Image: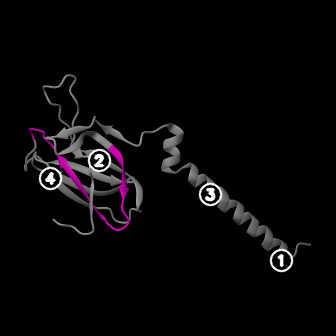
């Protein structure tokens, strides 16, 4: 006959085995594990690095683009310097850029003019450390003088700033 202690021991063993299997499975499905397994790039949808009037570097993003960023411990406001030199952009026809961090939607930026500007995005409870920034533009344009033409969404300055509060 099985004693109550035997059943309790068996139950604990089953729970521990299930917890270990769940931990192992979750690790296999993590973003980093998937990237390594399938050789996915940490950066995607960005053209080569360029320099703006010898002041700072930037990259043009395609309709979908992303890169790795480092989220600091205390600052929760990410500052993106963006420009969209699309000749059709205007307050009547703005460009919308959806911003995601680690796959979680955090904000939509509305760009109404062609000049460089800083846009503040609150990153909520994103853990500090390595994170993935992804941008999704609602439309692209192709400069007529380029051969072959690139599909340009927005220009993203290389340096991403951080603040503790909004300065809007």
Distance from disc 4 to disc 3, alpha carbons, whole Å, reads 45 Å
Magenta-highlighted residues: 66-88
Label ID, residue 4: 1
Query: Which residue occupies 36% across, 59% down?
Result: 71
Residue at numbered disc 4: 117
The residue at the point 83 percent across, 76 percent down is 5
Q: Nearer the viewer, mark 4 or mark 3?
A: 4
Q: Earlier in the sequence, mark 2 or mark 4?
A: 4
Residue at the outermost top position = 147
- Quarter of the image with the C terminus is bottom left
State how far apart marks 3 and 2 are (Cα): 32 Å
Where is residue 95? Give x, y as percent: 17, 46
* Residue at left offset 33%, top offset 48%: 134
Instruction: Examine the rendered structure and indicate whether residue 160 appears above or below residue 34.
Output: below
Q: Residues within 10 Å of mark 3 (few under 14, many from 20)?
A: few
Q: Earlier in the sequence, mark 3 or mark 2?
A: 3
Q: Position of residue 159 (x, y in %)?
A: 26, 50
Q: Which mark is residue 135?
A: 2
Q: Which residue is mark 3?
A: 22
The CA span between labels 1 and 4 is 69 Å
């Amino acid at each position: 006959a099985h004693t109550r202690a035997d059943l309790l021991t068996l139950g604990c063993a089953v729970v521990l085995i299930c917890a270990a299997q769940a931990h192992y499975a979750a690790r296999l499905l993590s973003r980093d594990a998937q990237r390594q397994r399938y050789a996915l790039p940490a950066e995607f949808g960005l053209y080569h690095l360029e320099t703006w009037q010898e002041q700072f570097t930037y990259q043009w993003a395609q309709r979908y683009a992303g890169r790795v960023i480092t989220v600091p411990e205390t600052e929760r406001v990410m500052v993106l310097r963006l420009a969209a030199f699309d000749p059709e952009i205007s307050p009547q026809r703005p460009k919308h850029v959806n911003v995601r961090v680690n796959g979680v939607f955090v904000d939509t930026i509305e760009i109404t003019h062609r000049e460089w500007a800083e846009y503040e995005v609150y990153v909520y409870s994103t853990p500090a450390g390595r994170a993935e920034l992804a941008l999704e533009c609602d439309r692209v344009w192709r400069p007529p003088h380029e051969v072959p033409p690139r599909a340009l969404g927005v220009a993203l300055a290389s340096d991403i700033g951080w603040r503790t509060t909004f300065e809007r």
